[in-house]
Amino acid sequence: MSNSVYIPLLIVMALSTYLVRALPFTLFQGKIRNKRVQAFFDYIPYSVLSAMTFPAILYSTGSVLSAGAGFLTALLLAWKGKSLLTVAIGTCLVTLIVSLLMTLV
């Protein structure tokens, strides 16, 4: 792509990002009384974060198997109530061990 294409793309991305963040504030001024609308806005950050994170997890390593093992480890440790540092270190170690075992076999 030439450099002249990047500026319009950047402007469109900036506007779309701004509109997604600004529209709820302009449409719903004041306290939201509808429980369904409030629940929708409460769960949006979690669903968007999941939608962005899950594909990145599966393709973060050279193998979906090692990435899946790390993902399952993270889920298990988080479900057990371990700290974020413990989950991160445990996930990295399991992913590393599975990757090393796959190269040996």
Image: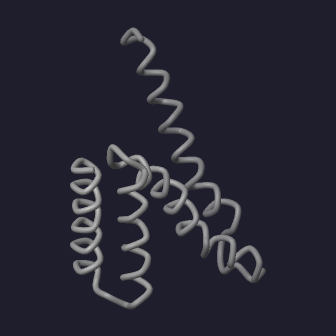
Is 71 or 11 nearer to us in this picture? 71
Q: Position of residue 41 (x, y in %)?
A: 63, 71
Q: What residue do we see at 35% from left, 65% from top?
A: 70
Q: What residue do we see at 24% from left, 80% from top?
A: 86
Q: Tell me if residue 17 comes above or below residue 97 in the rendering.
A: above
Quarter of the rendering occupied by the N terminus: top left
Q: Position of residue 103 (x, y in %)?
A: 24, 47
Q: Quadrant of residue 30?
A: bottom right
Q: Position of residue 79 (x, y in %)?
A: 44, 86
Q: Residue furthest front?
A: 105
Q: Position of residue 36 (x, y in %)?
A: 77, 78
Q: Tell me if residue 26 comes above or below residue 76 in the rendering.
A: above
Q: What residue do we see at 49% from left, 21% from top?
A: 8
Q: Is residue 70 left or right of residue 36?
A: left
Q: Quadrant of residue 65?
A: bottom left
Number of numbered discs visible in the structure rendering: 0
Q: Is residue 8 left or right of residue 19?
A: left
Q: Residue furthest bottom?
A: 81
Q: Tell me if residue 42 comes above or below residue 4 in the rendering.
A: below
Q: Tell me if residue 62 comes above or below residue 65 in the rendering.
A: above
